[in-house]
Amino acid sequence: MQQHLSFDAIVIGSGPGGEGAAMGLVKQGARVAVVERYFSVGGGCTHWGTIPSKALRHAVSRIIEFNQNPLYSDNSRILKSTFPDILRQADNVINQQTRMRQGFYERNNCEIFSGEARFVDAHSVSVTYPDGTHDVLTAENIIIACGSRPYHPPGVDFSHPRIYDSDSILELNHEPKHVIIYGAGVIGCEYASIFRGLSVKVDLINTRDRLLAFLDQEMSDALSYHFWNSGVVIRHNEEFEHIEGVDDGVIMHLKSGKKVKADCMLYANGRTGNTNTLGLENVGLEADGRGLLKVNSMYQTAVPHVYAVGDVIGYPSLASAAYDQGRIAAQAIAKGEANVHLVEDIPTGIYTIPEISSVGKTEQELTAMKVPYEVGRAQFKHLARAQIAGMNVGSLKILFHRETKQILGIHCFGERAAEIIHIGQAIMEQKGEGNTIEYFVNTTFNYPTMAEAYRVAALNGLNRLF
């Protein structure tokens, strides 16, 4: 029997953006309904994206660490694992995350409706359940946090058992010896690291002229070198003509005339907002060609009581930012305005092996802006903690203003880079004289630590001044 249920707010999607919005609203006393089409909460972040890929990466990097450590390994004992094996480890992490997040909703009396959401009108959402029944929810405010999915170009047969996207790769159940990864963005580079770490041959097809062009060029070059050194074949400036699925694998025909054959292919080139089934026309909204919605600084769409957060609004498409966007939208709804906003310099964490992380401006941006900057560098191989841990690959780079000593950008390549970056970010976010590279010289660091790289880099940079 169909029900009509009334709430203060409806949140469509239970990923980071939806969770941030729902928790922010219930803490303000609102009655909130969360609609989730999947059978458990967490969204793409928990089930197909951030959590599983980072769990896979962790398992692979530990295998590499074991095999490279002379204390544990010798020629007669090499630790091996397959992609399906390490997927089971990822499942354990996903289940822990799901249970934890389910608890958030239950403890805060947030009602979850497990079905497909579709707008009926400006204040009503229909929820269709797997058995075909449906309810209608109404609310004063609605938050769209339905996330994104891998882009499927026309002409590529994703139903073929050897052609995967970044979601379906988590169902890979055979043991490939050779994989083609099409798209050398963040997802493509992360999976190239994972497969190569399992001794799988990797052809990484890059549609651009260098890897991760948004990064500082030295970081991009370091990753390219590391890939080359580990045996990844990178093919720059290539696009596919057509992709042919055969019985024992995939043949990729490139526009340049080349052909590449492998056991399977991961297509990782672009994502699309999950707005196609929402019935946006019933509320007077229209998504762009990539399924994305435009919003203002408070995450309101063109219809003021309908908000959108997370991947469905595009850049920066980060789980970390989505939480904050949801929280800001909740504050805007509860108080009429938001007095918090996303930090201007959002840190980037790329979980390749080794990691890359950065915050602030790149050398290329500062040069184009004609900002008089200087560079301070620290090589991990010179740090006692890195030597102890066998983490010799990597470096930290600080960019700072020659006159004011203000930190303008921080770039890190190496194991634990995504953690290390936050030390510098904390100083960079200080206003006025609080943000200066001299902080790292005048502060006593624990020894030995990776954080000590900041002191080394700061001294290196200040010694360049005259």
Image: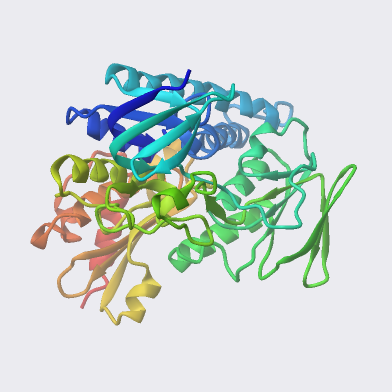
Q: Residue furthest right?
A: 247
The answer to whether residue 392 is left or right of residue 455 is: right
Kindly indicate the quadrant of the structure image that contains residue 441: bottom left
Residue 79 position, x and y percent, is 67, 28
Nearer to the camera, 382 or 57: 57
As drawn, 293 above or below 77: below
Residue at 53% from the left image edge and 64% from the top image edge: 221
Query: Toward the viewer: 179 or 33?
Result: 33
Residue at (76, 57) in percent of width and height: 155
Q: Which residue is drawn at 47% across and 57% down?
A: 287
Q: Which one is nearer the viewer's eye here, 83 or 413?
A: 83
Q: Can residue 81 be seen in this view?
A: no
Q: Residue 345: x, y in percent?
A: 29, 58
Q: How many marks?
A: 0
Q: Where is residue 373 in the image (x, y as percent from the top left)?
A: 27, 74
Residue 283 on image: x %, y %: 40, 49
Residue reaching furthest to the left: 433
Quadrant location, the C terminus? bottom left
